[in-house]
């Protein structure tokens, strides 16, 4: 709701009428299930399908998403009209009693709904126990205050947007815990070819964030992954040049492949980093995780 209201406020400030239509997605409703790698194909679009259905049916003109929730390749008939300026893309630790990951006692219980975060936490602290954590930010914070968890891992962006950054105990640098592709950025999705709406929302697009997220999503697409996979991707743009950090991890944290490369064109860079990761064993690792043959990266 914060995301939708933020976009609506920006549009109203430009003199446009904006009405918010609340749509519950499957991912919102199924708060008690844990997303596992075996079910990855079935959960693609769980946080977007119902919204895109409403968009296709002309019930809404604009869909607002967390970019990390969007599949690496949009379904036919849709396009990203804007990728908004990115908030802090990093992950954070929240705990009532402990100051950072290193201070957690052996066997401490850590909550996260993300296989990507779980794999990287296990790589850093294989002695910790990981339990699934679902629900919105407030629900997760309440669980962090209970005896259920010693710590939880969340995205910095969500906490900062809701004015709850005071609960953050540790910010993980991207080299420690590589974020999800698109994390911290908002996506504005429209019907493909709807130039009138595209023109209206075009001012929301932030070119540096767009370039970085395009590189991250190109990597994810080349690796054949979605938003619930043990793949991290984080790009930075300085002086017009992109640098992409990427990570593929075994869920138990026993094997972590990390690659960093630079380039000028987002899609080419994402595919190049994926090719390097495949050469280092990422294909076999992904096959091991999903039990299916990972798609070979498209050549630039």
Image: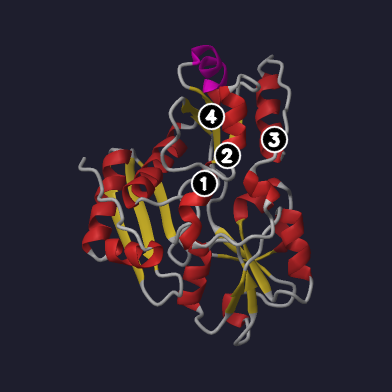
Residue depicted at 51% across the width and 63% down the height: 115
Q: From the viewer's perspective, is the residue at label 3 or at label 4 nearer?
A: 3
- Mark 3 vs mark 4, CA separation in Å: 15 Å
Tell me the tag on residue 48: 2
Residue 32 placement: quadrant: bottom right
| Residue situated furthest top in the rendering | 196
**Residue 10 shown left or right of residue 187 in the figure:** right
Give the quarter of the figure containing the C terminus.
Answer: top left
**Residue 113: x and y, percent?**
60, 62
Q: Earlier in the sequence, mark 4 or mark 1?
A: 1
Tell me the tag on residue 68: 1
Q: Earlier in the sequence, mark 2 or mark 3?
A: 3
Q: Earlier in the sequence, mark 3 or mark 1?
A: 3
Tell how many labels: 4
**Residue 130: x and y, percent?**
59, 74
- Mark 4 vs mark 1, CA separation in Å: 13 Å
Q: Are marks 4 and 1 in contact (CB under 8 Å)?
A: no
Q: Which residue is mark 3?
A: 23
């Amino acid at each position: 709701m914060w995301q939708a209201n933020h976009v609506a406020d920006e549009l109203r400030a430009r003199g446009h009428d904006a009405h918010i239509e609340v749509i519950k997605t499957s991912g919102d409703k199924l708060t008690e299930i844990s997303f596992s790698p075996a079910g990855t194909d079935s959960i693609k679009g769980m946080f977007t399908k119902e919204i895109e259905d409403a968009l296709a049916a002309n019930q809404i003109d604009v869909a607002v998403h967390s970019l990390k929730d969007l599949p690496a390749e949009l379904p036919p008939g849709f396009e990203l009209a804007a990728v908004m300026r990115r908030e802090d893309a990093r992950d954070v630790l929240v705990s009532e009693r402990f100051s950072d990951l290193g201070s957690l006692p052996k066997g401490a219980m850590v909550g996260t709904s993300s296989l990507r975060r779980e794999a990287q936490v296990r790589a850093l602290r294989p002695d910790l126990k990981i339990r699934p954590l679902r629900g919105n930010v407030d629900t997760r914070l309440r669980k962090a205050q209970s005896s259920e968890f010693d710590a939880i891992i969340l995205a910095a962006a969500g906490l900062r947007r809701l004015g709850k950054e005071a609960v953050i105990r540790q910010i993980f640098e991207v080299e420690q815990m590589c974020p999800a592709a698109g994390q911290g950025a908002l996506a504005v999705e429209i019907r493909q070819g709807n130039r009138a709406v595209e023109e209206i929302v075009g001012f929301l697009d932030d070119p540096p964030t767009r370039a970085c997220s395009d590189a991250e999503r190109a990597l994810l697409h080349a690796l054949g992954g979605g938003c619930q996979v043990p793949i991290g991707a984080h790009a930075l743009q300085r002086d017009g040049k992109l640098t992409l950090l990427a990570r593929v991890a075994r869920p138990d944290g026993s094997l972590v492949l990390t690659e960093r490369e630079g380039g000028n064109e987002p899609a080419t860079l994402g595919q190049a980093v994926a090719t390097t990761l495949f050469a280092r064993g990422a294909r076999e690792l992904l096959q091991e995780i999903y039990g299916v043959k990972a798609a070979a990266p498209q050549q630039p």
